[in-house]
Image (cartoon, helix red, strand yellow):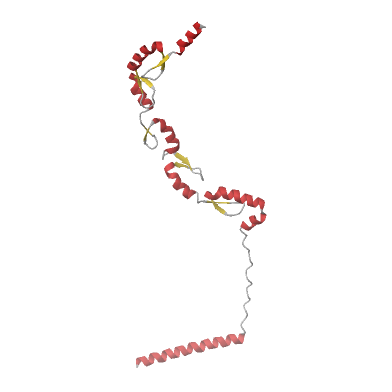
Amino acid sequence: MADAGSHIAAVVATSTCTHCQREIPSSNIDLHSVHCARNLQKCEHCGEMVPRKLMEEHYNENHAPVNCSLCKETLRPEILDLHKSEQCTQRMVACAYCEYELPAIDIHEHQDVCGNRTEFCQTCKNYIRLREWIGHEMQCHVSSNGSEESSSARTIPEREVRPPPPVRPVRAVPAAQHRRLLFTIAVTGIAVMVGSILFQKEESF
């Protein structure tokens, strides 16, 4: 029993390295501390212990600022993936109405126009703007299934086709009345000619 207790005490006995903050067996702490302080350096960005000769390489691979290939913004490498997928203004985003892909910086202006386009609803026979389509479709289908009267009220009635009005027949003019009309026109023409001649003679004097 005494031997087992001594073995457990030897295993448990550790000391904390003041340089790397790791738990080191007490029997090796002095040797470890000298080696650790001479060869390892704690990265100020991630806290990882890195060999001194590899610190520059570690920094360049893990912490050096990088440029986004889409918008050229300088970022920390750990947020580059998030930036490209959710934040970059030049990432491609599909329009919610036509599924055409545009840069994120242009998508809102495009959707303002695209969402105002209309589609014909076969249920209510009206043209509905795309931005209102989902809500309209749900409401329209529920109404049409629950009430045929409300659905028919929204249907545009067909325009009534009326026959053209009857054409009145042209009445024939009697022969005697026709001769009187011609005589009146002839007398009027002669009177105008005589008056014109007299008017010209008066002006000559």
In the displayed structure, 20 sits above or below 142; it is: above
Q: Position of residue 22 (x, y in %)?
A: 41, 18
Q: Residue at x 41, y 30 (%)?
A: 78
Q: Where is residue 45 in the image (x, y as percent from the top left)?
A: 37, 27
- Horizontal relation, residue 151 to residue 187: left or right: right
Q: Which residue is drawn at 56% across and 54% down?
A: 127
In the displayed structure, 86 sits above or below 188; it is: above
Q: Position of residue 130 (x, y in %)?
A: 53, 49
State the residue in front, 185 or 150.
150
- Horizontal relation, residue 114 to residue 47: left or right: right
Quadrant in the rendering for residue 13: top left
State the residue in front, 159 or 20.
20
- Quadrant position of the C terminus in the picture: bottom left
Quadrant in the rendering for residue 182: bottom right
In the displayed structure, 42 sits above or below 186; it is: above
State the residue in front, 198 or 4.
4
Q: Position of residue 162 (x, y in %)?
A: 63, 66
Q: Residue at x 42, y 43 (%)?
A: 105
Q: Which residue is drawn at 45% across and 42% down?
A: 102
